[in-house]
Image (cartoon, grey):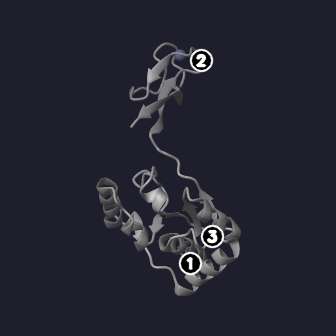
C-alpha cells in the first residue's frame, strides 16, 4: 500500500516542510483557505503545481461519518470544517487502497484518527538534516581516501578498497 501523508492546517502552515517530504501529500481546499503566512502559501501553491501536493474534496458520506463520530467523542465543537474534511479525506484515501497518515498537532484530530484506526504523526520541525560523508578505505592497512579518488586499490599495499560512512554531519538549513 502506498504511504501518503494528509496535512492539516497545523502541518501545512506550521513546521512541516512540504519540500522535504518523500511521500505524496494530500490536503483539502479549506486548509489552504486558512493560510495567513504568504511565504507558506506560496510554498503550498508551488507544491500543488509540481503535483507534490494534491487537493481533494472528500466524499459527503465520509464527512457525515466523521461528524457522527465527533458527536460521540465530544470533539464536534472543537473541530473546524477543515479538520473534519481532513479526517474524511484520510478515510477516502484508505478506501482507495492507500495507507494514509495524518500529520497534525491537533489533539482532537489525533483522537478521532486513533478511533478510526488511521495513523497520525506529530509535526516534526525540520531544521537539521543529517548528511553522510562516504570515504574509501583500505581494509588491510587502514589508509583512508576521499570518495572521489579515482582508484580501486590501495596505493600503499594494493588491497581492494572498501567504502564506509566516514562521518555523520548535521547541517543547519
Ligand atoms: Zn592498504
Task: Give the quarter of the image for residue 53.
Answer: bottom left
- Vertical arrangement, residue 152 with respect to residue 157, above or below: below
Of tags 1 and 3, which is closer to the observer? 3
Instruction: Say which residue appears at 57% left-offset and 53% top-offset.
Output: 122
Instruction: Examine the rendered structure and indicate whether residue 127 appears above or below residue 134.
Output: below
How busy is the neighbourhood of tag 3: few (under 14 within 10 Å), some, or many (20 plus)?
some
**N-terminal-most mark, 1 or 3:** 3
Q: Which sits earlier in the primary sequence, circle 2 or circle 1?
A: 1
> In terms of secondary structure, where does tag 3 sit?
loop
| Mark identifier at residue 140 | 2
| C-beta proximity under 8 Å, tags 1 and 3 | no
- Identify the secondary structure beneath mark 1: helix
The residue closer to the viewer here, 44 or 152, is: 44
Residue found at x 62% / y 82%? 65
Foreground disc of the pair 2, 3:
3
The disc at residue 114 is none
Q: Along the line of sight, which residue is nearer the eye, 96 or 142?
A: 96
Total residue callouts: 3
What percent of the width, then of the height, locates residue 118?
64, 67
Picture coordinates of residue 41 (x, y %)? Answer: 32, 60
Whether residue 2 is visible: yes
Reading the image, the residue beneath label 3 is 75
**CA distance for labels 1 and 3:** 20 Å
The numbered mark, 2 or 3, whose residue comes first in the sequence reads 3
Residue found 59% across the figure and 75% down from its top: 91
Element type at marker 2? loop
Pointer 1: what residue?
Answer: 92
Q: Determine whether the beta carbon of the residue marked 1 sits less than 8 angstroms from the nearest atom of ligand 1.
A: no
Query: Does any atom of ligand 1 lie closer than 8 Å to the CB of label 2?
Result: yes
- Between the C-alphas of marks 2 and 3, the distance is 64 Å
Amino acid at each position: 500500500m502506498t504511504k501518503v501523508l494528509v496535512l492539516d492546517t497545523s502541518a501545512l502552515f506550521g513546521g512541516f516542510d512540504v519540500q522535504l517530504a518523500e511521500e505524496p501529500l494530500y490536503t483539502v481546499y479549506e486548509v489552504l483557505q486558512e493560510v495567513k503566512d504568504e511565504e507558506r502559501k506560496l510554498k503550498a501553491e508551488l507544491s500543488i503545481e509540481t503535483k507534490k501536493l494534491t487537493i481533494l474534496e472528500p466524499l459527503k458520506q465520509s464527512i457525515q461519518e466523521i461528524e457522527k463520530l465527533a458527536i460521540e467523542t465530544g470533539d464536534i465543537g472543537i473541530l473546524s470544517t477543515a479538520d473534519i474534511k481532513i479526517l474524511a479525506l484520510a478515510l477516502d484515501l484508505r478506501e482507495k487502497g492507500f495507507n494514509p497518515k495524518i500529520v497534525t498537532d491537533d489533539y482532537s484530530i489525533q483522537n478521532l484518527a486513533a478511533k478510526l484506526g488511521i495513523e497520525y504523526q506529530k509535526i516534526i520541525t525540520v531544521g537539521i538534516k543529517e548528511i553522510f560523508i562516504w570515504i574509501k578505505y583500505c581494509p588491510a592497512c587502514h589508509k583512508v581516501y576521499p570518495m572521489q579518488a579515482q582508484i580501486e586499490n590501495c596505493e600503499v599495499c594494493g588491497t581492494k578498497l572498501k567504502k564506509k560512512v566516514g562521518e555523520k554531519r548535521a547541517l543547519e538549513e
